[in-house]
Image: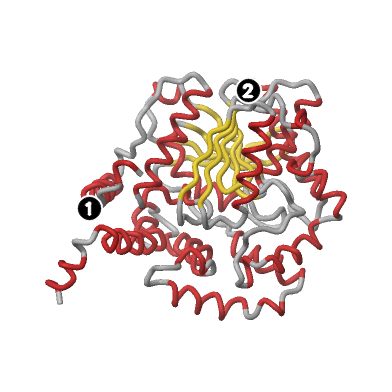
Amino acid sequence: MFRGLRDRLKNPWARRRLYRGLSVLAVASAPWVWYYSSDSKQVLLLQWNTMLKSTYMFEGTGLSQRAAAARESFSGKVSSVTPARAVQELREIMNIEGLSSPDWAREELVSFGGVGVWRVSSAIASPQDKANEVSILYAHGGRLVAGSAMRYMYLLSTWTYPLNASVGVVDYPLAPEVSPEHIVEAFSQACRSILDEQGGERLILAGDGTGAAIIFSTLMKLKDEGRDLPAAVVLTSPSADLLADGSFGQDRLTSNETWRAVRSLTGSEESLRKVSPLRQEGVDKFSGMPETLILYGTRDLAVDQAKQLKKRLLEANVRVEAIERQNLWPNWLFCYYTFPEGWADMQIVRDFIDGATSRTPQHVSFPQHPFLKRMKRVWTRNDPQAETS
């Protein structure tokens, strides 16, 4: 048996398929148990909740049937979706509270302009690194109806050391309890406060999913107010049109029917249009925007929107760098440390931020965790494409 397996793994594509399947398993279990000194059970639940209910992440891996079974028991049929139930299910997946800080990061709840921001920073950075630290203000995704600032803070804690940055996730209110315009104004107020306090030279706006809509709606407001803008924008799996359908899946939580149900509770068509940057007409709407880095995978839920956003920015003569990864799921940078493309892309983010803020370029590393360095060496040794991914 082992001889046959060894012969089969001589094929680089078979080997890559096996490693990708093992990486998914690692994301769901081992790295989180290793990293978090306490509350590992809740962190594991967070990962399994997010991943096992997203069948499209597991296509081609040994976990696909298990993922499908978990989703079926959780969701039922697409035809039974109602707006209230769709929002409830999204919140069950994306909201989680009560986790403890990972051992390499320091958390705090701060207020900017009266808006709560969960900020996480590196607890192990050297004094020299601290002096060169940049600030990232993050707008989380969730179609404006779901998502937890605390949940994202833990997912983003792995960014603090390699990017030499403090990451603040804005704890903005959610629809349908408030209007989409209110959500954008909450993020805008936090951004204004930081710009007034420290300027924009070391401020990066980042977000995923509908966080892109919040960010560019904010930038358009700040530009109209005549304010200085942040240094750069980093987006993963962006969605900047809240009225659009997309290349979504056919299961319950990724179907167009689900998003239409959610949209019906989020706000009126007029309200959603106001906070959808891609619905704003005229090249001048995007002119003067900060340089932007867009990362998306071909399994993203809104690939077309990422491409359209890039096109609109280029038409407005904004410097844009776009990275498309084949067969990668949304927001893979949350678990960049488990596969070679992730490490490479984190280095791209670091280089982009260093260039935008005039910092000395640095190589991405995680020296205080030998486990990660060992994992990366294994990938590089066994995957002939890892060096160039």
The x and y percentages for residue 271 are 85, 49
Which residue shows up at 47% across the image and 25% down it?
354
Which residue shows up at 70% across the image and 44% down it?
213
Residue 133 is left or right of residue 369, and the answer is right
Q: Which residue is mark 1?
A: 382
The x and y percentages for residue 73 are 56, 81
Residue 284 is left or right of residue 361, and the answer is right
Residue 99 is left or right of residue 220, and the answer is left
Picture mark count: 2
The x and y percentages for residue 26 are 35, 60
Q: Amino acid at mark 1?
A: Asn
Q: Secondary structure at mark 1?
A: helix
Q: Which residue is mark 2?
A: 200
Which residue shows up at 44% across the image and 25% down it?
130
The x and y percentages for residue 81 are 72, 75
Q: Quadrant of residue 195?
A: top right
Disc 2 from disc 1: Cα separation: 43 Å
**Quick check: 206 above or below 382?**
above
Which residue shows up at 81% across the image and 24% down it?
225
* Quadrant of the snapshot with the C terminus: top left
**Quick check: 160 above or below 261?**
above
Q: Quadrant of residue 197?
A: top right
* Quadrant of the snapshot with the N terminus: bottom left
Q: Amino acid at mark 2?
A: Gly
Q: Secondary structure at mark 2?
A: loop
